[in-house]
Amino acid sequence: MSTEGYAEPLLSWSKSDIEQSIGFRGGKYTRTNNLLTFLIGALLTAIFFGAAMPFEGSAFTSMFTQRGPTPYVVVFLFFWALAILALKWRKLAFQKQVFKLELIPDEHDFVLSPSTASKLIDHIHMVVDNPGHFILLNRIVVALANLKNIGRVADVDDILRAQAEHEESSLETSYSLIQGFIWAIPVLGFIGTVLGLSSAIGGFGGVLSEAGSGDMEQITTALKSVTAGLATAFETTLVALVAALLLQLIVVFQKKSEEEFLDACTDFCVKRIVGRLRVSST
């Protein structure tokens, strides 16, 4: 293994991270920048409703534009969550690129010890500009730094396990905002239902008052307000439940991909780090 010949890092987080590359502060690991995802969500919402304008009279468009303010908020939260998930997917793909790097020498006789740990840390810093922003490399560097400074081989496996547990916890918290949206969207749908039913009940009172006059035209006009209220009641709930369902399914697949990546990092550390550890007198 040689650290010579690299004019610049083979993998640059500061240049290749999707958020960093467009001028926003990149979130650590697969976390996302809230401001960036908020702006993307707002832009997608504007595009969605702008694209719906030519079809203003259709039943589908009416579900979003003629049912009060609730569908607008639901659509915005849906696209905000989609923006977070899309960026997380891109950032996860970037994290996986570390497996393509030559991090540990393939020589069968190479062993890890307090004396070789320093060289390996230097090599990692040569091929990557900031190992602390990569899940796998951060695990390795933290463990090797302990081995280098303290020299206790037995502690390396414990540190790797502790890092793995910390990253699993970090994975869960990175989905907290999306989980909040998945909870809030159906609640907004139920709020729309209450508003719609309230409007329908109020309109029904008007129908009863018009029925006494016997004027069919006025009764028909009053019934239209009742049906509009009922449409708001049911369609806002439908839109919200479908949006929450789609988000939950996407979250399940995305989280599964991240969990598989963490498992792959653990396997790498067990086979290539723990499996190479030896007590050395040099």
Image: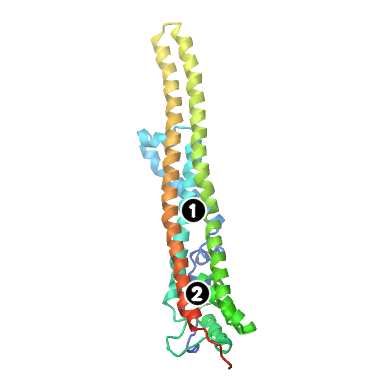
Where on the picture, by quarter, is residue 170? Answer: bottom right
Q: Amino acid at mark 1?
A: Ile
Q: Quadrant of the C terminus?
A: bottom right
Residue shown at 47% from the left, 54% from the top? 83
Whole-percent x and y of residue 129? 53, 77
Query: Which residue, given by chain and number where applicable, does mark 1 sit on?
Result: 40
Image: 3 above or below 164 = below
Residue shown at 45% from the left, 39% from the top? 240
Q: Earlier in the sequence, mark 1 or mark 2?
A: 2
Residue 201's disc number: none
Can residue 205 be seen here? The reply is yes
Whole-percent x and y of residue 29? 52, 66
Helix, strand, or loop for circle 2?
loop
Q: Amino acid at mark 2?
A: Ser
Report crowding for label 1: few under 14, some 14 to 19, many 20 or more residues within 10 A (C-alpha). Answer: some
Image: 207 above or below 242 = above
Can residue 9 be seen here? The reply is no
Q: CA distance from mark 1 to mark 2?
A: 24 Å
Closer to viewer: mark 1 or mark 2 = 2
Whole-percent x and y of residue 226? 44, 21
Query: Which residue, given by chain and number where applicable, does mark 2 sit on?
Result: 12
Image: 197 above or below 241 = above
Whole-percent x and y of residue 11? 47, 76
Report crowding for label 2: few under 14, some 14 to 19, many 20 or more residues within 10 A (C-alpha). Answer: some
Residue shown at 45% from the left, 66% from the top? 261
Relative horizontal placement of residue 57, taking residue 33 as reference (left or right):
left
